[in-house]
Each structure stands twice: as C-alpha cells, then as structure tokens.
Amino acid sequence: MADEPIEALDGKTPLEYAQTPMMDELSQVSEIGLAKTIPAGLKPGSDVANLAVIGYNPEVYYSGRSPLEALSIGVDMKDTDIAMRVNLVTVSDDDKDYANKIMIDHSAGEISTDEAEILLDAVRKELETDEYKFYLGTSYRHLCIWDKGEVLEFAQPHDILGQEIASHLSDSDIFVNMMKKSYEILNSHPINIERAKKGLNKANSIWFWGAGVKPKLDSFEEKTKLKGVMISAVDLLKGIAVGAGMTNIDVEGADGTLETNYEGKAFAAIKALTEDDYDFAYIHVEAPDEMGHQGSVERKVKAIENLDQRVIKPLVEELGKHGVEYRMLIMPDHPTPIRLRTHTSEPVPYMIYDNVHKVLSGLKYTEKDAKESGNFIENGYTTIERLIG
C-alpha cells in the first residue's frame, strides 16, 4: 500500500489520494508513525516483511520464502530439502532465444488456479523427477522441492518486469534448462492459445526463485499469550501461520486479486474474535501489492479504497456492536511503488487504534503524516508489542 508521490495523482501517493473516510476518522485518535520492516541486508520481500509485522525478527527466523509456502501447501519438508517458488510467468512470445525474451508479467495476468493446475500438470509430466517435485499452489504461485539441494540465487520475476531475462538467469544450467523447456511445453498449450484469443497474458514459462530451507518458527501463542488466526489468500501468509501454530481461515472468493472477497475476510475475523474464542486476527489483503506490481495507479487507489470501506469499516462497526474492547494495527508489510513495480525497503506507515484509550494525534494515515509524527520503530518486528502491550 505504501508508495511515492505520483504526478498523475497531483503529487500525492495512492494512500493520500484515495478516499478513505474510515481510516481518516480512526487516524485522528490513533498512534501514527513509521516502522522499518526490512532489516539491512535482507531483500524487501513479503516473506521478510510479514514475519516482521507479525512479530518475528527476520534476522533470526527467515529461512527463505518458499519453505513457508511449503508449510501452507502441506509439504512435509525434510531437513535436506530445498523449497523453491515456481511462478507461472509471461515472457515475450517471439522467435528470440529464451535468454533474450522479455519478462512481461510475473503473474501471467493473475491466472486462475484452475487453469494453473492444468498447465503445471503439463510441466510436471515432462520435468518432474524423484529429485525435483512440483506442487500446486494458488493462482500463479507454485512450488518445487529439490531433494538434497542447495540454496541458489534466483532473480525475483517481479523485479525484472520489462527487462530481457538473460542477465537475470541462474548460474544453474539445470534450472535454466527446465525454464527453457517449460516455454516449449506451455507457449502453445491450448489453455494459452485460448488466453491469447481473449487478450490475456499467456502463462508460457515457469520461473524459479525464493529458495530456502525448512523453517523453524516459535509458537505465536507462546510468544504473545494470544490465540491467533490468519486470514489470507496467499500461501506465504498461510505458511507463516502454520509455522507459528496459528489457525488458517479460508474465505470463499478470497483470491489475492482486486476482486477478492474483502467483506468475507472482515466477517471471518469478526466471527473468530467474537464467537470462536480467538484473541488475535491477522487479515492480509494482497490487492494493493499486486496493483503496484502491475503499475496501475487507478487500480491501486481502488484497492486502498476497498480496504477502507470493505474491510476496516465493517470491522469497526461490527466490533462496536459487540461492545468489545480492541486494538487495531493497520500497516503495509513493505512499499510497492508504482514507479518501480516492485518492493522497496523504505519504512512503512503504521496506525494503532484503541477503541477505548484513544490518542489524539490530529494526523491522517499517510506516508507524509507518519513521517511528521516523529514516531519511528527501527525494528519493525517490535511493532506488534505496541499493539498487544
């Protein structure tokens, strides 16, 4: 959600420009500030950042993105396994050698899981061995487990949009050759022929990245004395929850896109907190990040407005009707600026609202006001202590 001033928005950030009456109301009586969720030396990924937001020091607990997703999918990793994210991506459909193709779309137009399953099966039939096993995830996000592998460096596909992939390919011929082969398998697949006819991006290549080893997270409940739920459409977040011993709540229609079931997420949290004996709910909304990757100013603004009116507003209203005391933390995990179409390590604005003990700030929940507040949390993983303290 966090971003930079954009000329098309009269020099405002999407968060400043969006119509957010609910957050505007809460921010006047909330603690506003900045938190640094990406420690120096670590890449600004959703894995590192969300570990920090939920209270785990990434410098201690981070072991790679894909192993967390493996937990979500239910893959029982051995200590000698290496997990790798497998994106279904769109590379340029031309006569150039694979290395000279352009990375068009890291998400293949946010392809549906149903279509992705068929395409991944086609890849699996040709490429899977006892050493390399492929697993279905959600939408464009899938998994490969490398038996007795090693942690290799791979470029993140959302970091190289619009670029020729040659200089971003791994040093491993094995994985480069698998990606090349996947293009041969997928580019002319009937699913992709139909997608092209509809003007949709083909999911015409796999892309390996995010390698890591089996994670070891401490229990969230033991750390915080709170019984927690995770509400997200993204396997990474679900994997963090599994590792932390939290309960994952699946919401029908929650798919990580701009059209996700926002209200379903809000009401799942309300039910967990008011009926099901949970103390803590982590609601993750992927849409602002995806719209940042797409470089869509209009759709990112819409995602923020949806968050305000279709998640935060019903939470405040329904928890008010139940007469419970609560605190709410609102923050991005990391910025995804429209200008760059990828993540950065800049501090993110946070807001902590207490419905009983209000703090008269007189500020709006924006990047600018958060900076001017003077509140700065150097170690972002301690932000949660302010929420539950």
Image (spheres, helix red, strand yellow):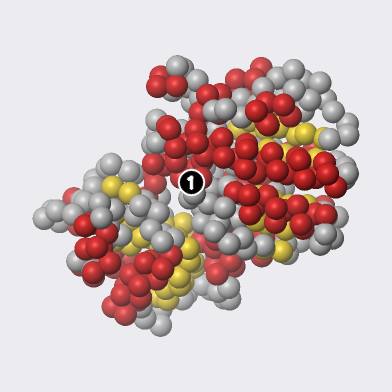
Mark 1, other Cα within 10 Å: few <14 / some 14–19 / many ≥20:
many
- Residue 97: x and y, percent? 15, 56
Q: Give the mark count.
A: 1
Residue 194 lies left or right of residue 129; in this view the side is: left
Q: Which residue is mark 1?
A: 258
Give the answer, above or below, for where 365 lies relative to 232. above
- Residue 49: x and y, percent? 59, 45
- Whether residue 50 is visible, yes or no, is yes
Q: Quadrant of residue 253?
A: bottom right
Q: Quadrant of residue 234?
A: bottom right
Residue 13 lies left or right of residue 28; in this view the side is: left
Q: Secondary structure at mark 1?
A: loop
Residue nearest the observer in this picture, 65 or 213 = 65
Q: Quadrant of residue 304?
A: top right
Q: Quadrant of the N terminus?
A: top right
The residue at 64%/53% (across/down) is 265
Kindly identify the amino acid type of the residue bearing the numbered disc 1.
Answer: Leu
- Residue 34: x and y, percent? 66, 29
Give the answer, above or below, for where 169 lies relative to 350. below
Give the answer, above or below, for where 88 lies relative to 350. below
Residue nearest the observer in this picture, 338 or 173 = 338
The residue at 63%/38% (across/down) is 309
